[in-house]
């Protein structure tokens, strides 16, 4: 069943009008016809089904037939990651959204290989939007503007996240060793790793370090592994 993003979907709204990109995707890409059923995702905890009742050249009308409300995750988690080359950071956004990450914080570090552009955040938002429609994640992740490492850590603390460094340095905890009440934001470095001065900053800020596996991984692999391991940990305790 095709899925569209419907931010105006609500618990008491029975008719939704679809315009713009979502209309184009529904009619011209998926080629949905009148009376066929589609799925709607609010990105804010509501997923519904409805029938297409009207199609014009500019918009479509959907009548809601079923809806379900999902609470915000009890144990939200975030990913802070250095911008990567070859658009590998797009893979981070897509796959980590599929795994339930609720916020992303792009980082500028000493060894970052790519500077942000004016379109970086909007591009990431489009990827996250596509991912929630693909996997039926009812919560669209929030994406921060790229920030230098120290500013980002300050922002994380102000927003009640607990930064957790994913590092190949030893000794380090495993993800299962983290306290149950922790609201973690996993920090992923660039391909070149962090400088010693950056590691010293993490130590000064009392930021714990975890190891994801016994091997050295690429940055995008580390981000996806952190999200997958924490998502599995949450599921194991439900």
Image (cartoon, helix red, strand yellow):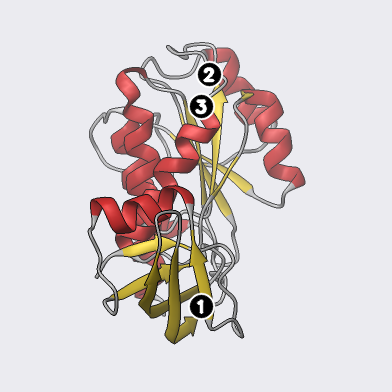
Distance from disc 2 to disc 3, alpha carbons, whole Å, reads 6 Å
Picture coordinates of residue 215, whole percent (x, y): 23, 33
SS type, badge 2: loop
Q: Locate residue 31: give its quadrant.
A: bottom left
Percent position (x, y) of residue 131?
Answer: 36, 52
Residue at 52% over, 25% down: 119
Is the C-beta separation of discs 2 and 3 under 8 Å?
Answer: yes
Q: Is residue 97 visible?
A: no
Quick one: label 3 or label 1, which is nearer the N terminus? 1
| Rendered position, 158 above or below 83 | below
Is residue 1 shown left or right of residue 229?
left
Camera-nearest residue between 208 and 112: 112
Q: Classify 124 as above or below 78.
A: above
Spot occupied by residue 165 in the image (x, y as percentages of width and height): 50, 37
Disc nearer the start of the sequence (2/1): 1
- Point 45% across, 59% down: residue: 59
Q: Which residue is mark 1?
A: 70
Label 2, on which residue?
Answer: 116
Q: Is any atom of residue 216 visible in this view? A: yes
Instruction: Kindly report the distance in space between the C-alpha atoms of the residues bearing marks 3 and 1.
Output: 29 Å
User: Residue 120 — which label?
Assistant: 3
How many residues crowd mark 2 within 10 Å: few (<14), some (14–19), many (20+)? some
**Residue located at (32% from left, 47% from top):** 95
């Amino acid at each position: 069943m095709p899925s569209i993003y419907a931010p105006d979907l609500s618990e008491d709204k029975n008719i939704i009008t679809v315009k713009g990109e979502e209309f184009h995707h529904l009619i011209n890409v998926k080629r949905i016809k009148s009376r066929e059923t589609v799925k709607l995702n609010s990105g804010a905890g509501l997923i519904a089904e409805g029938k297409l009742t009207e199609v014009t050249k500019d918009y479509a009308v959907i009548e809601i037939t079923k809806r379900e409300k999902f609470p915000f995750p009890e144990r939200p988690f975030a990913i802070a990651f250095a911008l990567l080359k070859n658009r590998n950071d797009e893979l981070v956004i897509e796959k980590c959204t599929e795994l339930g990450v609720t916020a992303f914080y792009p980082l500028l570090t000493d060894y970052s290989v790519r500077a942000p552009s004016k379109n970086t955040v909007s591009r990431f938002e489009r990827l996250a939007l596509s991912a929630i429609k693909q996997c039926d994640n009812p919560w669209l992740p929030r994406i921060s503007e790229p920030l230098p490492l120290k500013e980002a850590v300050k922002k994380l603390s102000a927003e009640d996240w607990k930064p957790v460094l994913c590092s190949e340095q030893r000794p380090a905890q495993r993800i299962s060793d983290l306290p149950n009440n922790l609201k973690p934001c996993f920090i992923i470095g660039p391909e070149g790793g962090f400088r010693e001065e950056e590691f010293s900053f993490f130590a000064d800020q009392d930021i714990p370090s975890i190891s994801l596996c016994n091997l050295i991984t690429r940055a995008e692999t580390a981000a996806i592994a952190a999200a997958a391991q924490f998502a599995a940990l949450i599921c194991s305790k439900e």
